[in-house]
Amino acid sequence: MLYNIRGKYYQFEERSVHMGVLMNVQLTAFSNNRIEPTTAIIELLLKELNSLGGYVFLPSMITGQNIDIAAGTIKSVNNLSFLTIDQTVQIACMNERIDVIFNGNKDNQDTTIEDFLVFAEKALASVMKQNNVYSNRLAINISLLSDVFEKELRDTKLGKKLCNTLDFYNDGEIEEWSTRTNSRRCINMSQNEVLNVITELSVVKENVTNNKRFLCHMDINTIQENAGYRFAFSDLNCFKHEVLEIIQNLKTNFEELGIDD
């Protein structure tokens, strides 16, 4: 079963798709340090990352562009990346961010959010420490998929609670629907930090059968207004610990609403 979600395709067997299927997890540190893909840096990071256990990485490159508006020039640049052979886990060192990414498929659903974030924290800390990178913002993004629902959206438990539309739509079945909520929460790290806790809920369809499922995307990040480069690699563990509690609450809410009587 093939789903096009946020511009990427995910394939799952019918029996493997259940409430709380993990589509992807991403831990990000935003920074202004570009990691040059020199041979020495590649060899150092490859040794560090493969020593963490759990995944075996190979180096690769991501082609990007630097646009200089004042000079009117566009320059292609190669950014460093590390990718597992099955392409399910990637560490991407871009110009202004470092991402550690897990992409779910039918073969790796035994991986939990907690398990991957433990690894992601260690991997990101290694990259930041070896390259003396400090970050001004941290973020965790997660996407979860629900069971198939066969009712009209407004007749599901989730739809009854969250789906409010203009009167115009009351006479017909809803084919597409989404909602986005952002609430701010304070957490205690080396100093008090404020988080955006963003949840986007939507309906997605399988490409062939048109089976409908709920997609829950969480984006939890430190607020943009605080732009100081204050996060060192040693702050990642505290950030992960604080955010995991929020993630578990949101995941539980989503699972409870996604199960119809």
Image: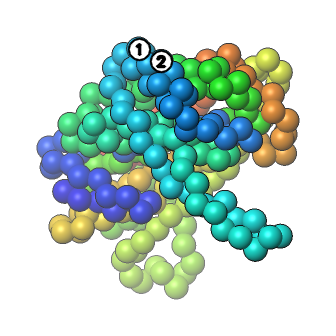
| Quadrant of the rendered image containing residue 243 | top right
Give the residue furthest to the front.
39
Residue drawn at point x = 70 percent, y = 24 percent: 132
- Indicate which disc residue 48 carries: 2
Q: Which mark is residue 51?
A: 1
Amino acid type at circle 2 is Glu
Across the whole image, how many numbered discs are drawn on residues?
2
Q: Using the image, determine if residue 123 lies above or below residue 93.
A: above
Cα gap from disc 2 to disc 1, whole angstroms: 5 Å
Nearest the eye: 144 or 72:
72
Q: Is residue 71 above or below residue 41?
A: below
Give the quadrant of residue 221: top right
User: In terms of secondary structure, where does tag 1 sit?
Assistant: loop
Estimate how packed mark 1 is, as few (under 14), some (14 to 19) or many (20 or more) residues with alpha carbons within 10 Å.
Answer: few
Q: Is residue 254 left or right of residue 205?
A: right
Q: Position of residue 215 (x, y in %)?
A: 41, 53
Question: What residue is shown at x 54% (from left), y 50% (from top)?
Answer: 78
User: Residue 70: x, y in percent?
Assistant: 83, 70
The residue sitting at 25% across, 63% down in the picture is: 206
* Residue 242 appears anywhere in the view: no
Task: State the mark number for residue 228.
Answer: none
Q: What element does badge 2 sit on?
A: helix
Residue 5 horizontal side relative to residue 151, left or right: right
Is residue 8 among the parts visible in the rendering? Answer: yes
Check contact, mark 2 vs mark 1: CB within 8 A. yes
**Residue kind at label 1, given as amino acid type:** Ser
Q: Quadrant of residue 165?
A: bottom right
What percent of the width, then of the height, locates residue 256?
A: 40, 39
Residue 260 x %, y %: 31, 48
